[in-house]
Image: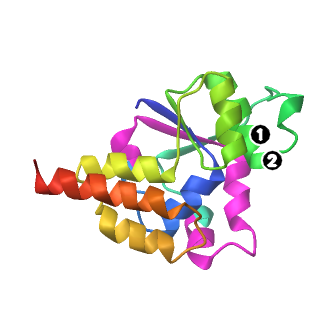
Amino acid sequence: MRVVVTDTGPLHYLILTNTTDPLPRLSARIIAPTIVRAEPLHQEAPSRVQAWAAAPAAWLTFMSTSEEAGDDLARLDDGERAAIALAMTIRPDLVLRDDRDGVAAARARGFAVTGTLSFLERAAIRGLVSLVDVVASLKATNFHARPELYEGLLTRDRARRDGP
């Protein structure tokens, strides 16, 4: 992955699980819409997320765009719409986001999209994170995933680690 556009959600959960380090190791540039800088600073965000957002990592670039994402995205929040608009402007290799409607909208516009779990699996394949530990950390947050997604992730991880 060369250029990745991220939305607030995946960053939020990578921060909470202390797994942001793989982002710059798996991509050359990570870009977020300017609004993504403000959303994690909201008073209702966990203190760890607020602290990270107050002094974000140097590898994260914030960018605004005048591109309109389209009227069909009214159901998405501001950050999700901004991430799609930014992707339409810079044409990244990957869009990192979790929201189902946002994923569908990005894919409908021709973007490759991955979510937090898939990103973490890529990081684990490269030996950058322990999926067992990260899944346990995610389950301790308000991250929502179907149990079979977690189980499939951990089964593939065990098979990789244990070999044939």
Instruction: Farthest residue to the front: give it.
Output: 148
Look at the picture and state if 23 lies above or below 18: above
Q: Amino acid at mark 1?
A: Arg
- In the rendering, at what x and y percent does residue 104 appear? 67, 35
Crowd tier of the residue under label 2, counting other residues whose Cα lies within 10 Å: few below 14, some 14–19, many 20 or above: some
Q: Which residues are magenta?
A: 23-52
Q: Is residue 38 magenta?
A: yes
- In the rendering, at what x and y percent does residue 1 appear? 40, 32
Res. 105 visible in picture: yes
The residue sitting at 24% across, 47% down in the picture is 126
> What mark, if any, has residue 78 been given in the picture?
2
The residue sitting at 16% across, 56% down in the picture is 161
Q: Which residue is mark 1?
A: 81
- State if disc 2 and disc 1 touch (CB < 8 Å): yes
Q: Amino acid at mark 2?
A: Asp
The residue sitting at 75% across, 75% down in the picture is 43
SS type, badge 2? helix
- In the rendering, at what x and y percent does residue 48 appear? 55, 75
